[in-house]
Amino acid sequence: MGSGLMNMRCFWVGFFLFCGFWVSGFCDKDGFLSISCGGTTGYTDSSNISWIPDDEYVSTGNITASFSDPIRFFPDTQGRNCYRVPVINASSLVLVRAQFLYRNYDGRGKPPAFSVSLGTAITSTINLTTNDPWTEEFIWPVSKDTLSFCLHAIPDGGSPVISSLELRPLPQGAYASGVGDFPNKSLRKSYRINCGYSNGSLRYPLDPYDRIWDADQNFMPFHVSVGFAIQQYFNLSGLGEDPPVAVLQTARVLARRNVLTYNLPLDTLGDYFIVLYFAGIFPVSPSFDVVINGDVIQSNYTIKISDVSALYFTQKEIKSLNLTLKSISYYPQVNGIEVYEIVGIPQEASSTTVSALQVIQQSAGLDLGWQDDPCSPSPWDHIGCEGSLVTSLELSDINLRSISPTFGDLLDLKTLDLHNTSLTGEIQNLGSLQRLESLNLSFNELTSFGSELENLVSLQILDLQNNSLQGTVPDSLGELVDLHLLNLENNKLQGTLPVSLNKEALEIRTSGNLCLSFSTMSCNEVSSTPSIETPQVTAFPQKKNTKQDHLAIIAGAVGGAIIALLFISLAVFLFRKKKRTEVTYASKGATEIRNWNAAKVFSYKEIKAATNNFKEVIGRGSFGSVYLGKLPDGKIVAVKVRSDKSQLGADSFINEVSLLSQIRHQNLVCLEGFCHESKQQILVYEYLPGGSLADRLYGPNCKKASLSWVRRLKIAVDAAKGLDYLHKGNEPRIIHRDVKCSNILLDEDVNAKVCDFGLSKQITRADATHVTTIVKGTAGYLDPEYFSTRQLTEKSDVYSFGVVLLELICGREPLIHSGTPDSFNLVLWAKPYLQAGAFEVVDDSLMGTFDGKSMRKAALIAVRSVERDASQRPTIAEVLAELKEAYSIQLSYLQTREHSS
Ligand SMILES: *[C@@H]1O[C@H](CO)[C@@H](O)[C@H](O)[C@H]1NC(C)=O
Ligand SMILES: *[C@@H]1O[C@H](CO)[C@@H](O)[C@H](O)[C@H]1NC(C)=O
Ligand SMILES: *[C@@H]1O[C@H](CO)[C@@H](O)[C@H](O)[C@H]1NC(C)=O
Ligand SMILES: *[C@@H]1O[C@H](CO)[C@@H](O)[C@H](O)[C@H]1NC(C)=O
Ligand SMILES: *[C@@H]1O[C@H](CO)[C@@H](O)[C@H](O)[C@H]1NC(C)=O
Ligand SMILES: *[C@@H]1O[C@H](CO)[C@@H](O)[C@H](O)[C@H]1NC(C)=O
Ligand SMILES: *[C@@H]1O[C@H](CO)[C@@H](O)[C@H](O)[C@H]1NC(C)=O
Ligand SMILES: CC(=O)N[C@H]1CO[C@H](CO)[C@@H](O)[C@@H]1O
């Protein structure tokens, strides 16, 4: 079942690639892409093929202008230098040809040696001392939208150099017969021989796929034989490889002896794929045995008059090729020979892993040079792999600040080292790493163990030294049966260590804490007279990267100042509180709000009365709790009380009040009033009895089945209307920034309204097209482009709304941590299916109830909304228009169905 699903997925992905185009600026009518490496201008060659310069496809290296044959070389002899060519057509199979020239561009007279890789496979080593020029050619099954061709320096090899790179689409199904499991194999050309031809090589336009066929006189030094070039009609149908007529018209025929032999030396010991082409160009039908390296591979093979045929063989573990045709009747004959080395393509890392690593790279604000596949052909810096699995990640000495949820997607990690990365707060988001054996979070400012460490069932080494961990050591650490080293040195821990940790196999280091031991006695004494801890000074290793250090120091200083201020205010607060029991604050923000003449201003007393002293909780979130209330006029309201823990509270509170007091729309939750006194931040909204869309879709007593497709479309239309109003509104436009299912509320008639404007941003005309902000939002809904560029536009809301649409269609949450890694991320998982009109990802409870056209419309607009490239996404107005259509199609479908039944 699972693998069936995967196959379908591969099929659809393949289908997609197949239907697109090379998206290069220039490409021939035949789909050729011909890149002149180091070239500065485009030109057309003698075969009428257009060549273009390479600067669009490569970002490193130097070029030489002083030679007639341009080249690009890479004097940085570290690491890889890559050409990245976008491919979308992927006629599923492409011929990639690269040429390398030395021509003493550096005046050193020492030709370089280096290796090259295509996709995830290291394919060959180029040694220009042996051959100059050197040509490499591959038949490559394209599976991604970018083809990476990289040159890798090798020790003492000199600077890699390249002169041309050509891509030629091949007919679909070609060369597949000999290589059963093609998707992870490719072919590297050893020989392509135009038998019986002795006047140079033949290529485009005689071969429409621009394969280069070499004359064969060089391959047969020991036998006298005749080449024929005969013009005659023959039946070309049937061969997937579509060999050119010009090649078939000539043959090598042995006239006198009965054995025809080609001796072909091979580069390396390996598996080879051999194709022999035969054409019945003579008025007789010869029969012969085909013998390869002494074994009869095909006995009594007959060429029929006027017929074209081919034989395919795979030979394992060979170092040279002796190809012999032994006559049975008439003379043995062959028209074309191709010999390829079979090169395995290592599996790619899962898309979840790749996107998680990209997000981590982006969130660290660093360009770690992480591109293409993390493991193959060689692992990225800071990363270790086992096969295609990323098993270690080491990111010390950078500014990460928190362990983001994406770390939890790296499910294969065995080693995670985040020492000295400015982590603060609690240890979080790592609970899913069941294979993690070694976790190093030392030299950070973590304050709490969090609650997830106990889930790391394979953990052996836990290094938490030199943090600011407070309180006691949690008992649950004792559940980690494999743990053998726990380093807690230099924290602010105290109390007794849980007995569960008192095991022989476990070494615990505890020095430098307030008091930490297994003995109850000594600790009780100390903790009753807690010492005043002086701030801990930790020496970090000296770093060269000064800019970051400055930032860190500034951040530290500012942070310190803020903490000091907070401390002082707290002291003042406590002091005052002692003196007077009831103090009313009217902060500057509150005064301003009053002046805005907004919704009703409530007193704390009124709120207390309305909520019956905060009796009934109807919702909880990171911001605090929501209570049910009743105003004196009988109106039922939802009262949102911010907890004082929320540090961003003040800002977002004022933001939300000021925004909501300006706008009123039937699809935006209406603010009835607010209260801002006694350090209280309370918002009073209209009450929507239907709960949130998230509750409906996934809540504990979820009524998902009650959400029919037409209702879901109605909800989507409503929410889109609300967002459209925000985006279109007159100055200032508003970007919601936190569109998600839990922020879409429903009334008793399942009308939807968008709520929670705590993160919303106003865009004035002066801001032009975007504003640059600190990235905020909810994991799973966050626009990847906003995440990487920090430039906020309305299209970020469109992305988040697209995720909501996908949730409505698929009936699942944006991020899950079960099933196969490829399905963790809703967007990555569902997009290819929906794009292809494949509805097996649609929510089971909708099956059989929707009109295909309505679903297709909604699915396509959802998919377009979550395009990575924001400029490719529709506006919310377009989304709304499409959803309205999908809605009315479904309505009339239901009506017809009702009538007919
Ligand atoms: C070269 O190609 C162009 C179109 O791409 C065509 O018009 C022209 O006739 C061709 N020239 C030759 C010599 O084939
Ligand atoms: C390569 O180009 C860079 C600047 O583009 C230059 O600094 C460097 O000297 C060049 N290297 C060689 C070997 O020409
Ligand atoms: C390249 O070939 C030359 C001559 O065959 C040989 O001396 C040299 O060691 C080779 N270089 C590498 C890196 O293999
Ligand atoms: C070989 O090809 C050249 C042009 O490439 C042509 O001028 C010559 O006549 C050909 N020779 C034979 C024997 O076909
Ligand atoms: C090639 O194979 C044929 C038949 O197996 C054999 O007669 C011949 O000696 C071989 N030639 C070489 C050079 O190995
Ligand atoms: C070879 O095959 C042909 C028909 O394909 C048959 O007539 C002939 O007898 C066979 N010869 C041998 C030696 O098997
Ligand atoms: C290719 O796939 C086959 C079966 O799917 C597998 O056995 C083989 O190991 C794979 N080869 C590589 C190089 O990944
Ligand atoms: C530009 C190009 O090569 N397009 C091709 C994409 O693949 C389809 C299917 O093989 C071809 O028909 C197109 O010509």
Image (cartoon, rainbow, N blue to C red):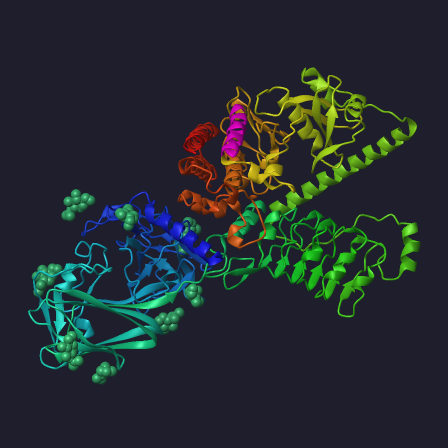
- In this rendering, the answer to whether 436 lies above or below 657 is below
Q: Position of residue 58 (x, y in %)?
A: 39, 50
Would you say residue 10 is visible in this rendering? yes
Q: In the image, residue 555 lies at what x, y percent?
A: 68, 41
Q: How many marks?
A: 0
**Residue 720 on the magenta segment:** yes
What span is colored magenta in the figure? 710-725
- Judge whether residue 223 can be spotted in this image: no
Left or right of 780 in this view: 554: right
Q: Tell me where residue 253 sits by quadrant.
A: bottom left
Residue 665 quadrant: top right
The one nearer the camera, 603 or 547, is 603
Ligand 4: quadrant of the figure? bottom left
Residue 745 location (% of width, % of height): 61, 31
Q: Quadrant location of residue 741?
A: top right
Q: Position of residue 145 (x, y in %)?
A: 39, 49
Residue 148, above or below 554: below
Main secondary structure of the magenta stretch: helix
Asked whether, in this view, residue 730 is left or right of residue 613, the answer is left
Nearest the viewer among 59 and 546 is: 59
Image quarter hosting the C terminus: top left
At horizontal 64% and vertical 20% (from top left) the residue drawn is 661
Residue drawn 18% across the image and 52% down it:
47
Is 409 covered by the magenta stretch?
A: no
Q: Nearer the viewer, residue 326 or 748?
A: 748
